[in-house]
Image (spheres, grey):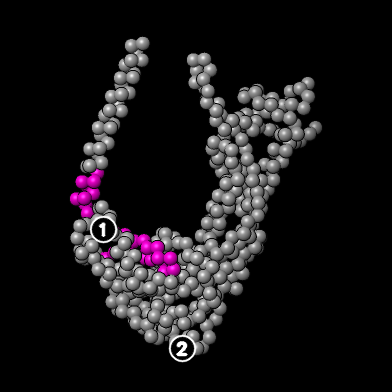
Amino acid sequence: MADTSVNYKCPSCSAPLAYTPGSGSKIKCEYCEAEFTVEELEKLYAEQEAAAAQANKVKDAKIEKKQFEMEAAGGAWDAEEIAILKAMTCSSCGAEIVCDNNTMATECVYCGNPTMVPGRYEQQLRPDMVIPFQKNKQDAKLAFAEYHRGKWLLPSNFASKARVEAIQGMYVPYWLFNESVEAEAEYSATKTRCYTDGDYDVTETDYYKVHRAGTMNFYNVPVDGSVKMDDTWMESIEPFDYSQLVPFNTSYMAGFLADKYDVDAEAALPNAEVRIKESADGVLRYTVDGYDSCTTEHLSVFRTDGKEQYAMAPVWILTTKYEDKPYTFVMNGQTGKLVGELPVDENKAKMYWGVASLITLPITYFICKWIVLILMEAMAD
């Protein structure tokens, strides 16, 4: 007696399928009446088994997939470079920044504390690459002025009272990941057709399973290496133009600060792989066209090769105060893109929502009245 059995489900409605004797090579679903050949079902389930095997492969790949060459990122400082560097530590928040002997840091760029204690530079990895500053301090001031110009909910006296109290250029540590991956995905897609059949409005929806797979290469996927720098802000001022990366040299640090990384490459890798997986899904989904909807059912991304490098990216940090509350702004030192938080005038905000309500309420009233009239006419008929 056979000790195994095969159970198929209908690809259209997921109901159980059974072969009807005498029906030749066709199998018909008793629920949705869809018909399939034996060859079609065998091929479909072979693909699903392959996808499941790939998913297990990815799960096991946490150990087996090729590891990054972590030891290849960064290098050792030489004695001359160490001699011209010093470390500054904030006694308030504990932030550590690095600068050359000619750079004066009188206040912490993170918390605004005016006391920075100089100390001996404790060696970390030497950066591989750096993106030099393209925007200067004046560019940062102009970007700040443009950023708050024309904001309706801003306090009226903000422009006259707000002054950039501190502005400092700083190199922020980044890990840049390169990955080669094999990606495979299965999507649920639909095509919908609407038509009139006598007295009925009919909506007919066809369901499809779409399979996509391919190999992809990702270069310079960035992950911020500093806990103190807000990841949301750093992602908001992206992208940097990585074609302008140059080999690191301490001369680029003259007059600037540099944050010491406190997130190493191994800790940063999962964030990079989240980005890579989302991008791979986007690339595969882009090829699924001709459908009215598309939903990801399964996605596996297997790393076949990987390498990272340690780089420094230029950022201007501006701080200002309004009514004794500090506000911080961050600007991409290469492109000039600036982000930050602005104060809100509560009275203006209330007025704004009041005006919005005055505009929308009459519109809502007339729409409801129109609907009621239509219903009354329909009932009268």
Identity of the amino acid at label 1?
Pro
Q: In the rendered image, which quarter contains the C terminus?
A: top left
- Mark yes or no: residue 68 visible: yes
**252 with respect to 75 (left or right):** left
Please give the name of the residue rendered at 30% of the width and 26% of the height, measured from the top-left corner.
Answer: 368
- SS at circle 2: helix
Please tell me whether mark 1 sits on a helix, a strand or a loop.
Answer: loop
Q: Position of residue 229 (x, y in %)?
A: 40, 66
Foreground mark, 2 or 1, reads 1
Residue 126 part of the magenta segment: no
Mark identifier at residue 150: none
Which residue is depicted at the point 22% across and 61% down?
158
Q: Quadrant of the N terminus?
A: top right
Identify residue for label 1.
Answer: 343
Q: Is residue 352 magenta?
A: yes
The mark total stands at 2
Residue 269 point in image, percent of width and height: 54, 63
Tell me: residue 378, above or below residue 328.
above
- Seen as rendered, the residue at the extreme right is 1
Q: Which residues are magenta?
A: 326-353
Classify residue 49 by image quadrant. Answer: top right
For the point 55% across and 64% down, the residue is 220
Q: Position of residue 180 (x, y in %)?
A: 63, 60
What residue would you read off at disc 2? 83
115 in relation to 54, above or below: below
Amino acid marked by disc 2: Ala
**In the current view of this chain or complex, which residue is farthest to the top?**
381
